[in-house]
Amino acid sequence: MTIIKAVEFIAKWGELQRLYDKSLEMYLKSLEFDKLLNDTVGMIFSLGDIGAAYWNLNKADSVSKYFTESYKLANKLKNSHYITMMSNQLADFYNEIGEYELAMDYLHKNIGPTNILDQISTYAIAAKLYYENNKLDSAKYYYEVLLDIGTIHAKRTAHKKLSDIAMKHNQLRDATSHYQKYIFQHHFFPVH
């Protein structure tokens, strides 16, 4: 294991233990190593990890700064996967802090997901954004897409939200059907 991988491992371990300040220290060290090695891909990930660590520490200004730096590096590389990854992070972050227009801007900046995992991530964030902004028809569309392509966790969330949407439209049969599927998946595939 290289020193960089060891530092990243310690940072992830700190995050899992909710030692966010220690985790942040390690991610900053990892970024230093990435810069010394001129490892642009490593810097994209380190900057994203630093942003996420600041998010855990509720420091919105720093989250925005590091996610944006990571996004700019991904654009510089012209790597659609990294661009999608970071624009989705920015969209999710801005949605969480109530900056919905900015969140939508970043979501729409995606140059087009190139693989299924990018698509799942983009659609999950789009569905969440539309749902939280009470644009239920658009949210319903994206949650239905997730039922076809999503992971078990994305499908579970989609069933729950589709049940909620159906209830809001007094569609009890659909609400019950989706809720039963949500309960089944929640019981047999719990999130740890």
Image: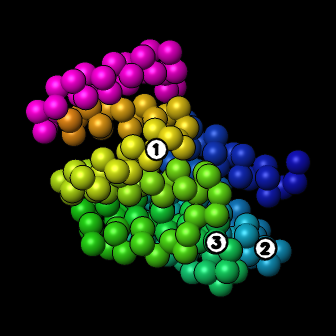
Residue at the spot of label 1: 146
Percent x, y for residue 51? 50, 63
Q: Secondary structure at mark 3?
A: helix
Left or right: residue 106 versus residue 19 is left
Are discs 2 and 1 less than 8 Å apart at CB?
no
Q: Amino acid at mark 3?
A: Ser
The mark found on residue 174 in the picture is: none
Q: Amino acid at mark 2?
A: Asp
* CA separation in Å, label 2 and label 1: 34 Å
Q: Relative to residue 9, is residue 26 depicted above or below?
A: below
Seen as rendered, the residue at the extreme right is 1
Q: Residues within 10 Å of mark 1 (few under 14, many from 20)?
A: many
The mark found on residue 39 in the picture is: 2
* CA separation in Å, label 3 and label 1: 21 Å
Q: Relative to residue 140, is residue 43 depicted above or below?
A: below
Which mark sits nearer the N-terminus, 3 or 2?
A: 2
Magenta-colored span: 167-192
The mark found on residue 80 in the picture is: 3
Please indicate, yes or no, whether residue 126 appears anywhere in the rendered image.
Answer: yes
27 in magenta: no
Q: Residue shown at 63%/76% (left/top)? A: 74
